[in-house]
Amino acid sequence: MAEKIGDALQAELNLVTAKLEETVADLPEGLAQFVRSALGEDRVLAGVVLASAAPARDTTEDKSRRVALAAALELLQIALNIHRLLLKPGQAGSIDSFLLGGTILAGDYCFSRAAVLAAQTNHPRVVTIFAELLQEVSQANLRRVITKDGSDREPHTFDEREALFRSGASAGALLAGLGEREEKLVVGYAECLGRLRVQDVVQSLGAKAEETLDSMPQRQRERWRELVLVL
């Protein structure tokens, strides 16, 4: 029986979730539970990668590479969320040294495993994009810590979610072998999606889809439409 639209993409999202679970399973039970609590069910970022990275002629290897990339970006996002717990005012001083050390180690572990997954794409430029993204978000967090004046006003505006979506789509477009013009369309669409609040993603994506998807390569156009159905 032919697959319904969205079934293939949902299957790949399930593979991403399985990779994340494998990563967590390698941790001691206490840390595993802590990281698992940060996983959540939102796989929009993985969906962006999977929608961007499908080539016109797909192979099993192509699928494996984009699933690895999607899992890498999701794991990077989890690592950032874990370390962000320590950036809350007074947070580091309010928890005991054991929990503090565990939080740092859990975040570092997720960072390192994300890098391993990115390397599994076997694409040097994709790995470079991943490294540059990590540098970008790390520098933004450092600026936030150094310059924050205690008034909850951030002196430097940086949209981490938008950066994650942009880099995920850019790396995905490389895996798909898109040309410069096609890559620009896909990345621009992902950036727009990244600026939306999580609860508005599906609704807004559906509203904008018909206006912009017609200009995308066919495979990406199909995938973005599938993304609406599975997220």
Image (spheres, rainbow, N blue to C red):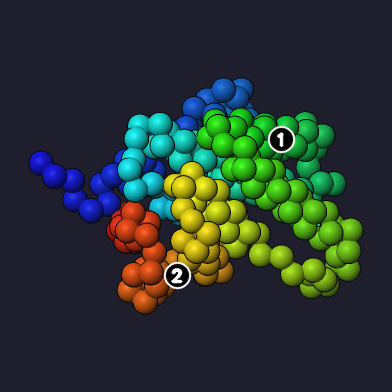
Visible in this render: residue 38?
Answer: no
Q: Position of residue 217 (x, y in %)?
A: 37, 60
Q: Position of residue 58 (x, y in %)?
A: 34, 40
Q: Reading the chain from its start, which is encountered first: label 1 or label 2?
A: 1
Q: Residue at x 63, y 59 (%)?
A: 163
Residue 88 image-quadrant placement: bottom right
The N terminus lies in quadrant:
top left
Quick one: 162 or 35, which is closer to the camera? Answer: 162
Residue placed at 81% from the left, 46% from the top?
92
Residue sitting at x 52%, y 25%: 25
Mark 1 sits on what residue? 108
Rendering quarter of residue 67: top left
At label 2, the amino acid type is Asp
* Amino acid on which disc 1 is placed: Asp
Q: Secondary structure at mark 2?
A: helix
Report which residue position mark 2 lands on: 200
* Residue 64, numbered circle: none
Q: Is any part of residue 98 visible from this angle?
A: yes
The quarter of the picture where the C terminus appears is: bottom left
- Crowding at dot 2, Cα within 10 Å, few <14 / some 14-19 / many 20+, comes out as few
Q: Compared to 130, does 228 lie above or below? A: below
Q: Is residue 218 above or below residue 176?
A: below
Q: Is residue 101 left or right of residue 174?
A: right
Q: Position of residue 13 (x, y in %)?
A: 39, 43
Q: Is residue 107 left or right of residue 185?
A: right
Few, some or many C-alpha atoms within 10 Å of disc 1 (few <14, some 14-19, many ≥20)? Answer: some
Query: Element under label 1?
Result: helix
Q: Where is residue 216, by image quadrant?
A: bottom left
Distance from the alpha carbon under mark 1 to that under mark 2: 31 Å
Query: Which residue is nearer to you in this view: 155 or 179?
Result: 179
In this rendering, the count of numbered labels is 2
In the image: residue 139, left or right of residue 218:
right
